[in-house]
Amino acid sequence: MAQFTDTHDRYDLSTTGDNVRESLADVIYNISPTETPFVSNAGRGKSSSDYKEWLVDSLAAVDTSNAFVDGDEFVADSLNAAERLGNYHQISKKQIVVSRRANKLTKAGRKAEISYQLSKVGDELKRDIEAIAMGNQAAVAGSAGVAPLTASLGAWIKTNSFRGATGTDPTLSSTTYGYPDAAAGAGTNTALSEANLLGIIKDCYLEGGNPSVVMMHPTVKQLFSNYMFGSSARIATPYQDHGKNPRGGVTAVGAVDVYVSDFGTLDVVPNRFQGTDEVWLLDMEYWDLSYIDSFLVEEISKTGDATKRHIISDWSICSKNEAASGVVADVDSTTAMVA
């Protein structure tokens, strides 16, 4: 229907500037993910040097010919020294500047702008550390003009690994000790297979590890779940009472979040901040994040009509024994998982 002549409508309120008061919700909606599975589940250590060191050792191989005659002469067994490993600390930080007026004015969704922005960049810094930790970065000592780098997960795991053709394991600065000075080399991507996963779980177990987490990119997690519900997986079809649940609907199971292997039960954990090329099988007992400073907030000297802050983390990854964990690398995330 048409309006009456000369009706003063909503649009007449805006001819010389809008006369309608805003209806702005006093809340800020932010769905950016902040879950950091590796950082949150790793141990936490304290460092007093920018180069963190620790010792690893192992028992001699089993001797199935260990038998001696009665009264045999004493001969000492050869003994191996513990190996000394290390990693450099990396300085990661976020820096903000907020003007006096921006901090004081009445705003929607927050009171003090400086506090709100510090909270945001704190979450951002934690996400950065998670992504770096899950990467394939070799350690760098650093210098006056070069930022030091900590060796990430991909530069540590070498004992239990499956890699595509031409893929290479990381190396230490010395043959069996030192720090990871060369990261793993990428190989030809290939479909994730259950056989490879089972093989790495077994290898970790034989070395003495007990992986409790399978960590993978969400895209690969869907490939994993799709495979496990297929006929090739050779697992029992899940049965349950498909009556109404408390939400008022019928439950449909479409994901596998726990994997029971011959050598233990593993949580299948998606990680938004890792790459699609690796599936990590982790014994979290043997991973620490060690800090000179954890998440230190400092006020920087004022030079104008604004407040300066930075939040800084001086951190390093401590792989207490990489042989307890493993990796299936060079995963093709565009191809279905196979047996």
Image (spheres, helix red, strand yellow):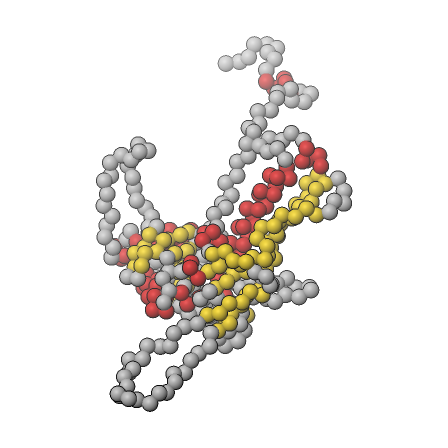
Is residue 59 in view from this perspective? yes
Tell me if 272 is positioned left or right of 100 in this view.
left
State whether residue 326 is above or below residue 119.
below
Residue 44 is situated, as x and y percent measured from the top left of the image, at: 50, 56
Against 35, is 323 above or below? below
Q: Is residue 88 left or right of residue 77?
A: right
Q: Position of residue 166 (x, y in %)?
A: 45, 71
Q: Nearer the viewer, residue 283 or 216?
A: 283
Q: Which image quarter is the C terminus in?
A: bottom left
Residue 237 position, x and y percent, is 23, 50
Q: Residue furthest top?
A: 5
| Residue 243 lies in quadrant | top left
Residue in the image at 56% along x and 60% along y: 47
- In the picture as drawn, the residue positioned furthest to the right comes out as 304
Q: How many marks?
A: 0
- Closer to the camera, 189 or 302? 302
Task: Examine the rendering and report whether any part of residue 149 can be seen.
Answer: no
At horizontal 51% and vertical 70% (from top left) the residue drawn is 85
From the viewer's perspective, tell me whether residue 31 is left or right of residue 193.
right
Residue 266 in the image, given as x and y percentages of width and height: 35, 56
Residue beneath the point at 68% across and 46% down:
299
